[in-house]
Structures are given as C-alpha cells and as structure tokens.
Image (cartoon, helix red, strand yellow):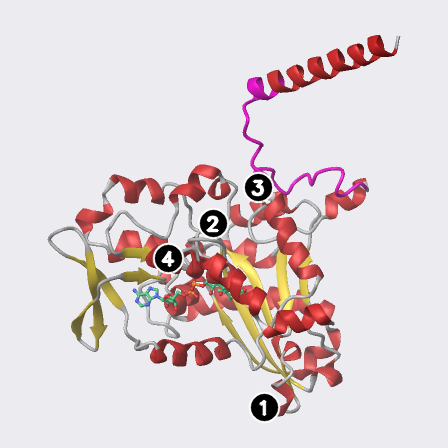
Amino acid sequence: QEITAVMWLYWILLVLLLLALLRRLLRGSSSPNPFSADCRRPPAPLVTDKDVRKKVIKQGVLPASTSFSLHAILVDHYMEGAWYPRGGPSEIAFHTIPVIKQAGGAVLTKAAVQSILVNADGKACGVSVQKGQDLVNIFAPIVISDAGIFNTYERLLPAEIRTLPDIQAQLHMVDHGISGLSVFIGLNGSKEELGLEGTNYFIYSHQNLDEAMNCFFTASREEAAENIPILFVTSPSSKDPTWQERYPGKSTLCILALAQYEWFEEWKEETVQKRGAEYESLKNAMVESILKTVLKLYPHLEDKIECISSGSPLTNQHYIASPKGELYGAAHSISRLQAEATAILRSQTCVPNLYLTGQDICLCGFMGALQGAVLCASAVLQRNLYSDMLRLWRNSPANNSKKKD
Ligand SMILES: Cc1cc2nc3c(=O)[nH]c(=O)nc-3n(C[C@H](O)[C@H](O)[C@H](O)COP(=O)(O)OP(=O)(O)OC[C@H]3O[C@@H](n4cnc5c(N)ncnc54)[C@H](O)[C@@H]3O)c2cc1C
C-alpha cells in the first residue's frame, strides 16, 4: 500500500512539473518587465487601503506614463532621508576639478562646444569650441558628451552623421522631458527662527494628478499660471550644516513647478534677463501663484522675504543648455525603460570614439547622472567598473569598521 501511495505521489509531481513546463513554454520564458506597470494603480499587495492607493505620491512625469517600480525605488530612497552636499552643490564641482587636473585634464568654463569634429573615416576626433569670436579646435582620441542625447545628436554632430539610421533609431526612443519653473527665495532669519526643516514637500492640489496635469498643460499660459497643480518645496539652507556659519541669520527656500516650454518659446532668441515686460509679467504671474500656495504652508514667512529670483524653461535652456528647458533631460517614460530601449540607449555611439554620459544614459538626478558616468567609463575602458567599485567597497576601511561595529 505504501509503495502504491509513493507511486501516486511520484506521478502527481511529474504531471505538475510537465504542466508547469508547458505553461512556461506557452507564455514564453521571459518574466515581465518590472518597470512596465505605471503609477496609476500601485499593485494591491503593496498598498492595501483603497483610499491610500489613490493618494500614493506621484511626481516628475505624469502618473500614467511613470513606471511604478522606478517610482517605488525613488520613494524608498526618500524614506531613509535624501542627501545634501555639505557646503552646497557647488562643492561637487569644487572637489571634482582637482581630480580631473591631477589626471592631466583641464576644465574650461564659458567654452561652448559648437560641434563635434569627425574625421574622414567617420571617427570622432575632437571638438570645436567657441572662444570669444573665434572657434578653436581641440583634438582628442575620445570624445565624451555630457550635453544630452538631443544636443549631441541633433546639434553637435555634423549634419550628414545626424541622419545615420542608428542615430535616428536612438532619437526615436526618447522624448524631451518635462520643463519647469524655479523660484529661489532669500529669507531673513535662521532655520530655527523661521521654523524651517531640511525636508522636501511635494504639494498636490488634486487627487487625480493625470487629469489635473492634462488640464494644466492644455490650458492657455495665463490660465495655467492661476492653477499650478504640483509644487516641490524645499529649504536648501536648512539641509546644509555649514550654512549658518557662512550666512548667519539668513535662510533660503527653493520651489520647482512644471511648465510648458512652448508657453515661453517666443522669447527664446531674446537675451537672458532682457526678455521684456511681457515675458516678465507671465513669469511673475506664475511666481505669485506659487507664492500664494507656499505661504499657506509657511504663513509666518510673508514679512521675512528679502529677495526672490525665478527661472523659466528658457532659463534652463540658457544656463544648462537643455534644448526645451527640461529639468531632468530625456523623459523618464515607461517606454524608455523597456528592454529594447535600455539595450540601444548606450554610452557607446555608432560614431567610433564618441561616447555619451550623464542622465540620458541612465536616470536623472545626481545619482542617476553618476551611474551614467560609470557606465560610460566602463564602455571607454572596456571594463566593468561596478566590479571594481564593489571590490573597493569590500576592502574599504569604512566598510570593514562598520562590519566590526
Ligand atoms: C532646477 C533643478 C533642480 C534639481 N534638483 C536636483 C536635486 O535636488 N537632486 C538631484 O539629484 N538632481 C536634481 N536635479 C537634476 C540634476 O541636476 C540633473 O539630473 C543632473 O545634473 C544631470 O547631470 P548631467 O551631467 O547629465 O547633466 P547636466 O548637469 O545638465 O550637465 C550638462 C552640462 O553640459 C553643458 N553643455 C551642454 N551643451 C554644451 C555645449 N555645447 N558646450 C559646452 N557645454 C555644454 C551644460 O551647460 C551643462 O552644464 C535638478 C535639476 C534642475 C534643473
């Protein structure tokens, strides 16, 4: 009897195994891309409360075109608290430049690259740089562009190379990211006096962000100015432990909002800070509407404001050369996270000796751009730098002392 039971069990297991194999064959062996689901309906097991599911924070791109998994990674990063560079973001360049110089490099400012030089063999061989009224050619065995995929492919490469099928295929996989307004406020008072914290606030005026954003983006620019649906509000000075030493009794607020590049496009040829009264009045209407919301959050700050400076998508275009005033480079859409796009949008380009780096190669933000740089350096050196970093980390005294603790 025992033998018969074991036999039956054996047959049942075999049938189950065969059924599982058959199912796998019929459905295809690849598991679904975890970045494909959008943000509108976070998976039920993760957020069980129905009301809370409606309120899950959404940001950056519209929820309908944002990957839920990517968003979850971002939120998880924020849950542990984000990072802020001690001394402010200029410290990043300040500490990077000596490393570049030590390796024999040079850092030039106000040196706009006009074009990437390509030799008769179709290989990148340097850049042509504006110096005053002149163009200076700088030759190099390898050219790495951090100017973003659109600038590099559509403006800096020679016209005959821009039309190459591989370049066009990559360009078709990306869209311009969302552009925005920035408002910087100088305040009288320390963070303690003003009750400011090193926190990021995301303020939403509607539950249905897709609907609100679609209304906002399709409205006239005058109507949009009255009804800005999402604000990011933060106090950079409160995050920096060195701030009060450097600027005692002062604080700052920084606010970001989304905006359409097209609302400001008509002034794109005008000189920065001289774009005229109509431009200023549109920008100021948006700034006033933003301030109204911010002062609801911080009503006690109204008489502490010392100065306000604001930027439009054209400001981003001027200062960081984003072609359409993008805040974060190419759009972080779900299509960009599909296997084909991630396989094709690589640092190595179809132009020999030309590489792309920065946010368009991985993701936006300081950390995203840094990952783009590691991927680029790995491609140039033909070596997996992530393995090197892992080895470094394993052997670092800081890691070992942590283990002992
Ligand atoms: C207002 C604002 C606030 C942000 N806040 C945060 C934040 O708090 N935390 C965070 O992690 N990220 C933040 N980001 C995003 C972050 O700044 C970017 O994701 C990151 O800087 C991208 O790095 P990158 O090196 O790819 O590009 P960039 O930092 O944009 O660098 C590209 C550089 O190339 C230069 N360039 C372009 N074309 C040429 C040319 N032809 N010749 C010479 N130079 C050229 C540009 O001027 C620019 O300096 C913010 C972005 C904005 C706009």
Q: Is mark 2 within 8 Å of ligand 1?
A: no
**Which amino acid does the dot numbered 2 rest on?**
Ala
The number of numbered badges drawn on the structure is 4
**Which amino acid does the dot numbered 3 rest on?**
Phe
Please report whichever mark, 2 or 3, sits nearer to the chain's N-terminal start. Answer: 3
Read off the residue under disc 3.
35
**Which amino acid does the dot numbered 1 rest on?**
Arg
User: For the residues marked 2 and 1, what is the alpha-carbon distance in whole angstroms?
Assistant: 37 Å
Q: Is mark 4 within 8 Å of ligand 1?
A: yes
Which label sits in the foreground, 3 or 1?
A: 3
Please report whichever mark, 2 or 1, sits nearer to the chain's N-terminal start. Answer: 1
Q: Is residue 97 left or right of residue 125?
A: right
Q: Which residue appears at 34% of the width and 76% of the height?
A: 103
Q: Quadrant of ligand 1?
A: bottom left
Percent coordinates x, y for residue 53 in the rendering? 75, 43
Which of the 4 image quadrants contains residue 295? bottom right
Q: Residues within 10 Å of mark 1 (few under 14, many from 20)?
A: few
Circle 2: element type = loop
Percent coordinates x, y for residue 225 in the rendering? 56, 59
Chain part drawn in magenta:
23-48
Q: Is mark 1 within 8 Å of ligand 1?
A: no
Read off the residue under disc 2.
331
- Residue 260 included in the magenta stretch of the image: no
Read off the residue under disc 4.
148
Q: Which mark is residue 246?
A: 1
Image quarter (top left, top right, bottom left or bottom right) of the C terminus: bottom right
**Which amino acid does the dot numbered 4 rest on?**
Gly
Which label sits in the foreground, 2 or 3?
A: 3
